[in-house]
Image (cartoon, rainbow, N blue to C red):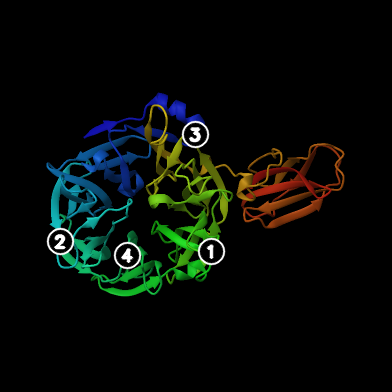
Amino acid sequence: MKKLFNCLFLLAFCQPLFAQEWTVELPQYKVAFMRDMIPVDSGEYVLGIGGNYYRGDGLILKVGKDGQYTDRKVHHPGMTLQYHSAIQLDNGNYMVFGICDDSLRDPMFQRYLQVDVFNYRLEMVSSMTYSVEDENSDYFYDSSFSYMMKSILSKNGTAILACRLTKHITNPSFSYYLCRPRFYEFDEAGGLLKMVDDNETVTHIEEIFYAPHSDNLMIAVHGAFPPNEGTGVYVVDPKLNIIARQDFYHLQGGPYSDHVGDLRCEGRWIDDECVIYDVSKSRPGGKDASRHTFYYNTLYKLDSALIVQAELRLPPYDSCTWSPEGTSTAYINDSTVFAFTTCSFDLFSDDVMQLNVILVDKDLNLLGRKVVKEDNVMLSSSTAPAAFNDGGCLAMVRFWNGSNYQGEQFTRNMLMKFRREDIEITWDVVNETETKPMSVAYPNPTKDIINIPIGETKINKARLQIFDMKGAKCLDCAITKQGNLISLNVQNLETGSYVYHIVSNDIIISVGKFVKQ
């Protein structure tokens, strides 16, 4: 185990480029992927779990909110190991769940469940290995970065694990893989207390969390979920009995609307009533109905009955954008929810050219967006973000130049901490296609008076229009004062972010933005 500190020269280099609180590069040999990140120690730290290159060893990464981190590589002689999920126990230890098998086997097929417990120094306290081979399952089949397990600390202090196992079905004419869910319960040492199987088919285990005002668990899954193919939720009682299944088919709006391709959820309830889901959707087009012409992301605010309370399509609106491999939301407080997406400008290209860090509030009002990108560099954030207790949000971002790059190839794994203050309120939040010149209003933010530059003094039939961040018009008034500046009292506007237009002869000649405190 080794403690590393963020390098001052690296921070000095990266901070002007990305303008978040800090950026720390992880040595390439240490990590190939992260499967999950969770807040621990009351949000003082974030625990990341995954594996290093060649899937040989498991990896635990404990990151402080100041950017310092400790890493622990776990090696099982003769075995491959990769961690997938983790929780913090009531005694302060961390229970980490993974899969493993003989190193000579294909790493996509793992027959054992690994349950390891570590203390706050990442020293191993206990280790348990369970075979999953039985009449209902053969192994963990890890295809295309599948999300196979999620865990939660139960209300009585035990650990609950929901995972997806695979049965290889063969007959004389063909064979196929049948993936089904299994639920485990463990004590604080990793000892098995209970195991329950289900016969329905799933492809991913997305999240596990408690239902509001209830001891029942909700387990979000993706796959061929009844009564319609798509994504849904299991409702499980404290004894791990499945008492209900609910589907997300209504989010698609019917069989001919845009298709729900994937779903992520942090599992944190807002006002004890609603939860935010990040849904990747695709738009069918052309003569072939199975061919998709566009991908985009939509946030849904759902109650416990999966009824939509609010929805918001995330920018950018002119390129293909999606949440790959677990990128989702991190709920900080009522006015700060981070959503992360990546996008490219070619549907059929693997080149992911930018990361979008998007800020919304709990009612899915769009507040701002930050774009992280570099020339000729691809980016992805393949792990769900996690929140510190100081309002910061931690994301792991990978920068690389692609396997087909002609020249020296590189990959950089970056830990990046974002705060609300780092996300600028941008005009493209309201209308991304606008390219009008910007003007700078002051003071900004303001509690009452805002001074707005209006450019030339001879404005003909000019008007001032103010919009909130959902595009609703809050003010539309004529500009009668000649000069290059007008002052406006915005004390009656609600607290939030606004965009204004200066319009002359029905043409927008300038735009700007301000924040009302």
Residue that lies at the very extreme toward the top in this rendered image: 9
Quadrant (top left, top right, bottom left, bottom right) of the N terminus: top left
From this view, report whether residue 306 is shown above or below residue 343: below
Amino acid at pointer 1: Ala
From this view, report whether residue 186 is shown above or below residue 29: below
Amino acid at pointer 3: Glu
CA separation, marks 2 and 1? 43 Å
Q: Give percent across and percent down for residue 419.
A: 48, 42
Q: Are marks 2 and 4 in contact (CB under 8 Å)?
A: no
Residue at position x 61%, y 44% from top?
426
CA separation, marks 4 and 3? 37 Å
Residue 58 appears in view = no
Name the residue tied to disc 4. 202
Amino acid at pointer 2: Glu
CA separation, marks 2 and 3? 46 Å
N-terminal of the pair, mark 4 or mark 3, is: 4
Residue that lies at the very extreme toward the left in this rendered image: 77
Structural crowding at the residue carrying mark 4, measured as other residues with C-alpha within 10 Å and reported as few (<14), some (14–19) or many (≥20): many
Name the residue tied to disc 2. 133
Structural crowding at the residue carrying mark 2, measured as other residues with C-alpha within 10 Å and reported as few (<14), some (14–19) or many (≥20): some
N-terminal of the pair, mark 3 or mark 1, is: 1
Tell me the mark number nearer the camera, choosing from 1 and 4: 4
Name the residue tied to disc 1. 310
Q: Are marks 2 and 1 in contact (CB under 8 Å)?
A: no
Structural crowding at the residue carrying mark 3, measured as other residues with C-alpha within 10 Å and reported as few (<14), some (14–19) or many (≥20): few
- Tell whether 270 sits left or right of 513: left
Q: Which mark is residue 374?
A: 3
Check disc 1 and report its element: helix, strand or loop.
strand
